[in-house]
Image: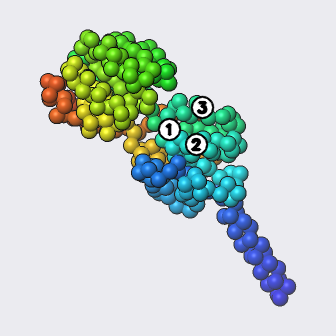
Amino acid sequence: MKRSGARLLRALVMLLCCMAGSLMAAPSVYLVLSGEADAYQRTAQAAADTLQASLPNVATIRTDIDALDTQTLQADDILIAIGTRAAQVLSQRPDQRLICSLLTEQSYSALPPAVAGQRTAVFIDQPVARQLALIRAGLPEWSRIAIVHGADSRDFVKAIKAAAPALGLTTNTAAVSSNQTLYNALQTVLATSSVLLAVPDPKVFNNFTIQNVLLTAYRHRSPVIGFSPAYVRAGAVMAVYSSPEQMGQQAAEIALQSLRGAPLSEATHPRYFSVSVNPHVARSLAIELPDAATLEAQIRRQEGAR
């Protein structure tokens, strides 16, 4: 009996050690922020909340990119890079599972190659079809789209020009090389009554140019479609965008799928989105604009039908 009890005790100890080793070996999810900006913090918090709601036992480690100790990383850990800088630094580990969030498609495309299946992203850019759907839903009587853009936005503009005719829309575009050429470009594309579609190109639309862009469009009685709620507050009539919370949620959902054994999905545009409207500016332009909830619902119905 004593020998039998001793064997049982040893077996139990071994079992506990195996369980402990298994728990220690479980992959962790690192939320790596590019900095202290509010958008990064909100994205990280939404990702952490989503992870803990579905897998409360998963270790979620939140850190700034400058404070990340790469020596502690295990081969099967998942990294969620929040912002462009974190993605650039973490892409130097091409064999580590990496999910990039809160960065543009252009920034993602500029990253060095990764091992196949080890990297993906949720772009902050809205898909072309969604932006055109917003224009059609909110401004059905307008058929011309004006765009000024820099060299970095050429692919986006090509996609807009390719997709617009199917919706009965025409485009008038002008390339700009600096802030100095922006005004003339705006005058050119707004010579005929058009919707000005702002593109997220910091060389064209930035803190130094936003007021001039909005004022010039307003003088031409042209509504502006922005790409963020800040743009709408500044004077654009509406915008479709994904909030940091929505971006963080989707990145975490991809991580959860990977933790459950699924391969990383292809890099994609955001699934979740919101619409913001500025009814005061719309009324000043004699535009009857649906409310944000109506526009969101209409876009979702269209996307669900595809």
Quarter-of-image position of residue 267 = top right
Residue type, label 3: Ala
Q: Earlier in the sequence, mark 2 or mark 1?
A: 2
Residue type, label 2: Ala
Q: Mark 1 points at which residue?
A: 103
Residue 226 tag number: none
Residue 110 tag number: 3
Residue type, label 1: Leu
Name which residue lies at 55% across and 57% down.
63
Name which residue lies at 44% across and 50% down.
37
Q: Which of marks 2 and 3 is nearer the N terminus?
A: 2
Q: Do the residues labelled 2 and 1 touch (CB within 8 Å)?
A: yes
Q: Disc 1 versus disc 3: distance between alpha carbons?
A: 11 Å
Name which residue lies at 39% across and 19% down.
181
On screen, residue 259 versus residue 168, left or right, reads: right
On screen, residue 111 versus residue 270, left or right, reads: right
User: Is residue 10 shown to the viewer in this render?
Assistant: yes
Query: Looking at this view, is 256 or 48 the one in front?
Result: 48
Query: Vertically, is 118 above or below 192?
Result: below
Q: How crowded is mark 2: few (under 14 residues within 10 Å), some or many (20 or more)?
A: many
Query: Looking at this view, is 23 or 206 the one in front?
Result: 206
Name which residue lies at 68% across and 59% down.
72
On screen, residue 219 versus residue 8, left or right, reads: left
Identify the secondary structure beneath mark 3.
loop
Identify the secondary structure beneath mark 2.
helix
> Can you give x and y, in whole percent of width and height, for residue 113 in the image?
67, 33
Q: Residues within 10 Å of mark 3 (few under 14, many from 20)?
A: few
Q: Name the residue under label 2.
A: 87
Q: Disc 2 versus disc 1: distance between alpha carbons?
A: 8 Å
